[in-house]
Image (spheres, helix red, strand yellow):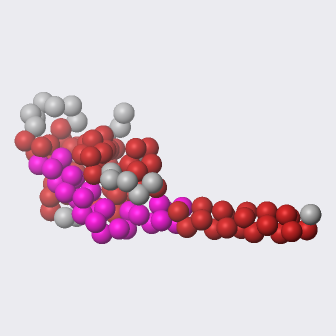
Amino acid sequence: MKKINVFLIAMVFVFSFVIQVFAADYWTFHKNDEFKNKVKYEMQVAAIAIMAEAADTANHAERVVYAKKILDGSASIEEFAIGVLTNASVKAKVTADQDYTSDLAFTVSSLFNAFAGVSL
């Protein structure tokens, strides 16, 4: 019985360590250079598209202000990267060490208004 208890305690320790390691990776992934560069690229694609949209587009003025910040380099890539990681699909793929690139354009576009300060 004592061996089983020791084994169970050891297993709980190992699993809790593994979970902490994966959580730490997820919580710091926004600092990963490759990830930030991919997010930055998609931010710039979105910003360029917004600069070219019709002036009568809803919230155009606020979107243009943020688009200019992205294009002049003053927008925080790291903050936006944290936002991207709130997307369930991106989060799941990052956690599972799968390719997340196909989800980035949609995620960046869906977050753009929030980062531009446009309220719902």
Relative to the observer, which residue lies in front, 111 or 58? 111
**Residue located 26% across and 46% down the image:** 102
Whole-percent x, y for residue 113 in the image: 29, 42
Can residue 60 be seen from the camera position used here?
A: yes
Whole-percent x, y for residue 105 in the image: 24, 45
The magenta span reads 23-48
Please tell me whether the stretch drawn in magenta is mainly helix, strand or loop: helix
Q: Taking 68 as reference, is 21 left or right?
A: right
Q: Is residue 25 magenta?
A: yes
Q: Taking 21 as reference, is 67 left or right?
A: left
Up the image or down, 63 lies above or below 71; here it is above
Up the image or down, 78 lies above or below 93; here it is below
Whole-percent x, y for residue 70 in the image: 20, 57
- Split into 4 quadrants, where in the image is the C terminus? top left
**Residue located 30% across and 40% down the image:** 110
- Split into 4 quadrants, where in the image is the N terminus? bottom right
Relative to the observer, which residue lies in front, 68 or 36? 36
Whole-percent x, y for residue 42 in the image: 21, 52
